Amino acid sequence: MLPNRCLMCQQRILSRRQGICDVCLDASLYKAPICLGCGRQMSLSVAYCGQCLASNTLKVVAPCSYHDGAGHWVGQIKYQAQFAVIEVMVEALICRLYDLIAQGFIQMPQAIIAVPLHPKRLQQRGFNQAWLIARSVANKLQLPLLDNVLIRQVDTAPQAGLSGERRRKNMLGAFALTEKINWQRVAIVDDVVTTGTTVSEITRLLSQQYIDTQVWCLARAEAPGLN
Ligand SMILES: [Zn+2]
Ligand SMILES: [Zn+2]
């Protein structure tokens, strides 16, 4: 058997954990309070920054920044099929979740939905990283994972490089709900949340059925200009 080494520091991991060692994980996790809306660091432990309190309704739960240590490896789940980091980062997400619940900022959802890939993309890649993450979280929290209730009906162009307005237009009508969802609180799961345009579009769809939606991801890429 190959020794179990940390992807980040290359040192041997002696515990059952895979992918990232305790030291590298701890160094990557958020230390300061983070705005649930935009991901901005704040000096006070409140749910939203002043700007988001006035305008933003997204609730994003993430254990770390995409730009810090482990965040890079979250990106590699998709690009390099680097599945070893899923479990360790899901555990970090769950810690963060319980912390936010304890502070009264969010409530535990009743069901989980993974951000779907368009069938063509799924066929090309062979897996949906969001679904792999969602399945792991659902197992650990013993929550139902709702499959096939949300579909991606448009194979959207990549979002990178588009302006905010173009991103929103690009996503409009990209998703559809196939049935009525009989839950009041749902968590949408993605690997990385960047500008939040994709998850905002899904949140908008669910709000039409009066469902309170939060977004869970393993790393968050804050909008440029923040931090
Ligand atoms: Zn390490
Ligand atoms: Zn904010």
Image (tube, rainbow, N blue to C red):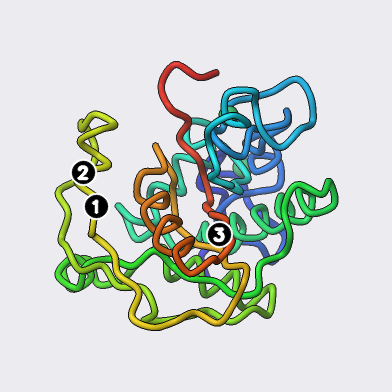
| Disc 3 to disc 1: CB gap under 8 Å | no
Residue occupying image coordinates x 65% and y 43%: 25
Instruction: Specify the label residue 169 is tagged with.
Output: 2
Q: Amino acid at mark 2?
A: Lys
Q: Are marks 1 and 2 in contact (CB under 8 Å)?
A: yes
Seen in the image, is 195 located left or right of residue 36?
left
Residue 89 location (% of width, % of height): 59, 55
Is 148 situated above or below 133?
below
Q: Which quadrant of the render holds ligand 1?
A: top right
Label 1 C-beta lies within 8 Å of the nearest ligand 2 atom? no
Q: How many marks?
A: 3
Disc sitting over residue 172 in the figure:
1
Tell me if 158 is positioned left or right of 129 in this view: left
Q: Tell me where residue 199 appears, x and y as whole percent.
A: 41, 52
Q: Could you tell which of marks 3 and 2 lies nearer the N-terminus?
A: 2
Q: Determine if the C-beta at disc 2 is less than 8 A from ligand 2.
A: no
Residue 3: name its quadrant.
bottom right
Mark 1 lies on a secondary structure that is loop
Q: CA distance from mark 1 to mark 2?
A: 5 Å
Q: How far across and down, in percent of the image, does residue 34 sit? A: 66, 32
Judge the density around disc 3: few (<14), some (14-19), many (≥20) Cα neighbours within 10 Å.
many
In the rendering, which numbered label is found on residue 213? Answer: 3
Q: Position of residue 55 (x, y in %)?
A: 53, 32
Element type where label 3 sits in the image: strand
Residue at the location (76% across, 48% down)?
Answer: 100
Using the image, tell me which numbered label, if any, was put on residue 94.
Answer: none
* Amino acid marked by disc 3: Thr
Q: Is label 2 in a helix, a strand or a loop?
A: helix
Q: Nearer the viewer, residue 139 or 111?
A: 111
Camera-side residue of 60 and 2:
60
